[in-house]
Amino acid sequence: MQGMLKRWISNKVERTMLHTPAVALLGPRQVGKTTLAQALAENRSALYLDLENPEDLLKLSDPYAFLSMHSNKLVIVDEIQRSPDLFMVLRGLIDKNRRMGRKGEQFLLLGSASIDLLRQSSESLAGRINYIELSGLNILEIPSSKLEDIRRLWLRGGFPESYLATTDSISMDWLENLIRTYLERDVPQMGFRVPAVRLRRLWTMLAHLQGENVNFSKLGGNLEVDGKTIASYIDILVDLLLVRRLEPWHANVKKRLVKSPHFYIRDSGILHRLLGISNYDSLLSNPVLGKSWEGFVIENIFSVLSSQVEAYFYRTAAGAEIDLLLKLSSNELWAIEIKNSVAPKIKKGFHLACEDVKATRKYVVYGGTDEFPIGNDTVVIALKNLLTNLQEVA
């Protein structure tokens, strides 16, 4: 059923492949990278290799010779982070084709580790590779923009199999299996020796602290480790694209600013599973409701941003706050407040913060479907409308 969902980013991947010999498509496990790659391969000669498959690994015993046999094909390599040595081979093949004046193979590399990790592993492909992140489904990709469908996406999260499950219960069971796979298989395979029970407890603690400041020492005390160890554990979840680290605005503002980052469980379905939220009614009565919606909106926004856009939050010691700041260019700065209510009340601190940073646009993303001004150059806007606006400018 995943094939029924058109991923808007597929056009971006196609365009990038036209002028770059290698494209790395990054995203967490089960987010739809393989499905998207197979769709891109339908109308062209292609070779698919999965580095978790022993047979495919055997084929790559002599990778240069094997891949040379498949010139002029789209070569898809899944779980590329399992074999970082392969990057040097790809460089040789790409440079050989350039010297001979031919296009040669086109490489589509799929990875479930972070962009930073892959960049460190692929220095040899500098100038030959582009990175594109595939997030979970956003509201532009689901069949309907009715409120009940948006709420289903919010509850179940953006993993296609979770969203498309026939019931909420099946969705939550699938998410539980995904969480266990990460803890019991993926983290150890990356070489990290972290007890699964301890990492899950930390992951759950971060869920309770969704979008708030995190005290590493306090978390460490609860888990009987030090603050530095907690920071390294969180780095693992960030590297696996499961947690987002949102940095504070750092421009020269003459205010006492909150300087520690905010952390968000990136997929709202995983957030809800970690917190034992099994249906929409239980979400509505849970204290994390507002922060859950905030994280859901932020991930939808990130899913359509170009890599050139910088994103921050802003908060002063006095309480002036902006949930999300988007620096689209040197002279374009959007301030975004996020409220789940269909009749949002905006605090004075938001407008004061916008004055501090000299925001060029002020939006309030709310739980409704309309768009209207509310004074102070501020527009209340539906999430779908905001994503459409961002696609046009970002």
Image (tube, grey):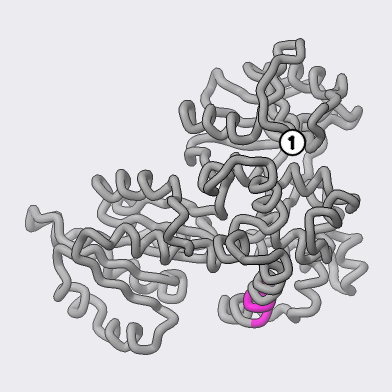
Q: Secondary structure at mark 1?
A: loop
Determine which quarter of the picture holds residue 56: bottom left
Identify the main secondary structure in magenta.
helix
Q: Position of residue 241 (x, y in %)?
A: 60, 59
Q: Residue at x 52, y 31 (%)?
A: 388
The answer to whether 167 is drawn above or below residue 385 in the figure is below
Amino acid bearing label 1: Gly
Q: Is residue 336 left or right of residue 289?
A: left
Q: Residue at x 89, y 32 (%)?
A: 317
Q: Is residue 244 left or right of residue 202?
A: left
Magenta segment, which residues? 179-184
Q: Which residue is mark 1?
A: 367
Determine which quarter of the picture holds residue 180: bottom right
Q: Is residue 181 magenta?
A: yes
Is residue 187 or residue 46 the one in the foreground? 46
Q: Residue at x 71, y 64 (%)?
A: 168
Q: Residue at x 41, y 75 (%)?
A: 83
